Image: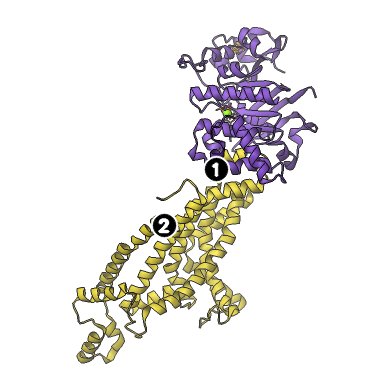
Chain colours: A yellow, B purple
Amino acid sequence: MRDYIIRRLLTLIPILIGVSIAIFIVMQLIPGDVVSGILGIEETPELRAMWEAKLGLDKPLIQQYFSWIGKALTGDFGESFRTGAPVFPEIMNRFKISAELALLACVIAWIIALPLGILSSLKRNSIIDRIVRVVALLGVSVPNFASATLLILFLSKTFNYYTPVKYVGLFENFGTNMEIMLLPAFILGSVMAGSVMRMTRSSMLEVLRQDYIKAVRAKGAPERVTIFRHAFKNSSIPIVTLIGMQIGGLMGGTVVIEQIFSIPGLGQFTLTGITQRDFPVVQGCVLFIAFLYVVINLLVDILYTYIDPRISYS
Amino acid sequence: MENLLEIRNLKITTLRGKNTVRLLDKVDLSVKKKCSFGVVGESGCGKSITANAILGLLPYPLRVSEGSIRYDSKDGEKELLALSKKEMRAVRGQEISMIFQEPMTSLDPIFTVEMQMFEALSFHHPHMGKGEMRERALEMLRRVNIPRPEQTLSSYAHQLSGGQLQRIMIAIALINDPRLLLADEPTTALDVTIQAQILKLMNDLKEQNDTSIIMITHDLGVIAETCEEVAVFYAGQIVEQASVVELFQHTAHPYTLGLLRAVTSLGGESRKLYTIPGIVPPGGQWSQGCRFADRCEQCREQCRRAMPALREIAPGHLCRCFLHGEEVEA
Ligand SMILES: Nc1ncnc2c1ncn2[C@@H]1O[C@H](COP(=O)(O)OP(=O)(O)OP(=O)(O)O)[C@@H](O)[C@H]1O
Ligand code: SF4
Ligand SMILES: [Mg+2]
């Protein structure tokens, strides 16, 4: 197992190098550059040359890349072209916020989806099952920017709600933080809940048909034991896979929601970096998100071995 | 009660769309104490659903629409169809156990054998200690001739063979000393040599424990090896019923004769040389006459018009066929 984990972590190196090259190329291809962004109408050839020298943009592309990756390998992700602030600490700050949002969204999604998915599989074709299925379908098919906008509109009309202007940290003021985070978390969570619910239902239905479930009942098992200990645990592999992918997606994929709710998370940081052509910021963010993806996938694969003894890596 | 189990007028139906479809029709069965009762018939005749109905394990949308299943339990006579869910759970695995056709999929793949044997005990003896459970589990594994019981306890299903798994299923089924064992094709999925071993094991255990067995199979050879009484199922009905000796010596129903011709002998190298042509009509496609008529070589005009009654043609020998009497089903 230890060897397996080490091997998996080693695969990170080519992945991250590949990603960084791709980002580098893409950043060169998109029109506009950081210097004209900084200088605006005050741009003169002298000023431009000065800034390009300062940011190292006067060097050949290959050299730019290698000097960046050389530093990145030592853990130095450089400074923002725009603010001059070191990128890595800022990524960590933003990550904490995104992680909180993601975690809240997951908890909300699971609280909604797992019980309803199980219930729906047990009461197949009943009224409850039908309602759950329709709601789940809505959850997966309405894009979250639409539900977010609608929800904000609805809340502002009926409860005089407004999206907060300034973010307040979890440890500065818990109450205010929750006021800011719960709504976006709910919107993200409800989208996730839709697919988790569908996966739970179909996976449970599949397992409930198995011989061993009948065999457990034939031993005289209470329904609770049959459903949770045997059926749900056996159903959980595809659910865990889905949840892992969703968490990975949440890390970088909350751009829209963070934008709508003015939450200074990783997604927003990446987006700002892109619009301002702030290369070190974009590189840092995307690499970090790629790193999270791989680690989360690894955690999911490790979790499999705890759920199912037939799965082992050697 | 004189008998251990009395099934009367059992009817099972299912739903297809909005229609109710009959799957089992007016089945009567009596299983004597300490007796092996065989149920034989081709695939789809209603053998498994009958067994599942006894333990209340019919899958939705199947249900018992009529009838009675009386059982002489350790603490008095019970109507199984009228039990609450809780009372039924107390019967399952303790009074009446069941083993299934596919040993490979009958154990939960993600738990150890030990855990699943302990479960069978703890559902009915919640206060039993780990040590005692372990002792009991090991004893059962030894009784079903599992070679390395300690090692087997910590194994998972995918680490064991089909024969071993079926032995373990039998050990689990018998761990609480039930009075009745429902064996739904327990050897069908196994190799011929393993089949013979499992059948011998079941015979031995039955002798030691005074457990009655309902042996479900599509193979009259298995019935001959293990049973005293036998009922032949066809298309949701009993078409012939007798003691095994009587059935083999004075086979009456054309369907039973067909099954006999198709018999595979255990342990031998003979293959199925003969199969009855045609298929069993499924529920919903039963004619009003004899349900075997389309496949019967001796079918007469009368057979298509009315359904023969199940009548006693010799002491203890029932048959549903116009060749053995003109009586018509009410
Ligand atoms: N879950 C179910 N849903 C719908 N119909 C079912 C279900 N289970 C059984 N049936 C139907 O009930 C009838 C009897 O099935 P049963 O399983 O009792 O047959 P069997 O005699 O045990 O055959 P086999 O040898 O194949 O096990 C069949 O026509 C089958 O199609
Ligand atoms: S009643 Fe007629 S069709 Fe049916 S088994 Fe007897 S002879 Fe054959
Ligand atoms: Mg069957």
Tell me the number on the disc at residue B154. 1
Crowd class of label 1 (few under 14; some 14 to 19; many from 20; radius 10 Å): few
Q: Chain of mark 2?
A: A
Tell me if I can see residue B50 in this picture: no
Is the residue marked 2 within 8 Å of ligand 1, measured from its CB?
no
Q: Chain of mark 1?
A: B
Left or right of B165? Residue A38 is left
The residue that disc 2 covers is A2
Q: Say which amino acid is labelled 2.
A: Arg
Q: Nearer the viewer, residue A89 or A289?
A: A89
Q: Quadrant of residue B19?
A: top right
Tell me if I can see residue B294 in this picture: yes
Callout 2 touching callout 1 (CB < 8 Å): no
Q: Quadrant of residue B309?
A: top right
Left or right of A171? Residue A23 is left
Give x and y (percent) for residue B282.
Answer: 57, 26
